[in-house]
Amino acid sequence: MIGKPPRFLQAIGVLESCFKEKFATPRQSGLVPAAQARLRLRPQYIPRESLRGLSGFSHVWILSYLHLNANKSFCATVHPPRLQGKAVGVFATRSPHRPSPIGLSLARLEKVEGETLYLSGLDLADGTPVIDVKPYLPDSDAIPGAKTGWPRLASRRRLAVTISAPAKAQLRGLERDGRPALGKLIRQALAHDPRNPRDRSQLDPAKLHEAKFLDCVVRFRIQGRRALIEDASQAAQAAKPRRVPVPPGLW
């Protein structure tokens, strides 16, 4: 007899991330080392003793529920941005658009304080429910000579990021106000071209894009292989988060 899985998974906490929306959130962990996040265990359910011994590890696996996945139906194939329009099977990718939208991310563990994990290099948006944390074990998780399939043949498009003189002044002011790594975070994130290559409106070189990092809004254009930041400012007022349906037990 095949055992039945539990009816619901339990979220151990909700991630607080520097990425405030899907757009400009990196497509893989490790692409933006300056990305900062914090995970506080739900103290009413998960005691801090469950983290005992974790601080001895430099990296952890984060399993998450990708709550911003808006797909209403299952598609067997997806179009990874790096394949420039070509399709592959969904299970040959880490796309969030999958039957069970479970995310797997490798993060650097900066420190553990009480029931809180301080992380960097993550590819998850603010408010993501976290299902589990597991230590990264180089002896078993890193396989020498492992095959990487189609990604080794795909081009990784990188943009040169430049900042206008007014935006430089704005960023310096924002960094002085308690966001010391904001400029580095923005440059690293935009260098990986956050646009959807299948959305023609996003590919228009005249389009002024907007992305949110921490409590700031950045506006930029992408022309050719260059992203030009034209404006950076503190968000006037944080809007109430959009309510996203989440299965019972995951919030």
Image (cartoon, rainbow, N blue to C red):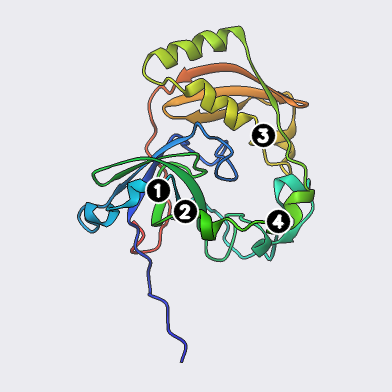
Q: What element carries label 1?
A: loop
Q: Is mark 3 on a helix, strand or loop?
A: loop
Tell me, yes or no, whether the two marked residues, 3 and 1, touch with CB atoms within 8 Å. no
- The label number, if any, that marks residue 136 in the structure image: 2
- The label number, if any, that marks residue 57 in the structure image: 1
Give the residue displayed 40% in from the left and 54% down from the top.
130
| Residue 129 left/right relative to 123 | left
Q: Compute the Cα span from label 3 to label 1.
A: 31 Å
Q: Compute the Cα span from label 2 to label 4.
A: 19 Å
Give the residue displayed 49% in from the left and 54% down from the top.
66
**Mark with earlier residue (3, 1):** 1
Check the picture and name the quadrant holding the C terminus. Answer: bottom left
Rate crowding at label 3 as few (under 14), some (14 to 19) or many (20 or more) other CA atoms within 10 Å. Answer: many
Q: Which of 209 and 250 is in front in this view?
A: 250
Rate crowding at label 1 as few (under 14), some (14 to 19) or many (20 or more) other CA atoms within 10 Å. Answer: some
Q: Compute the Cα span from label 4 to label 3.
A: 22 Å
In the rendered structure, which amino acid carries the disc numbered 1? Phe
Tell me, yes or no, whether the two marked residues, 1 and 2, touch with CB atoms within 8 Å. yes
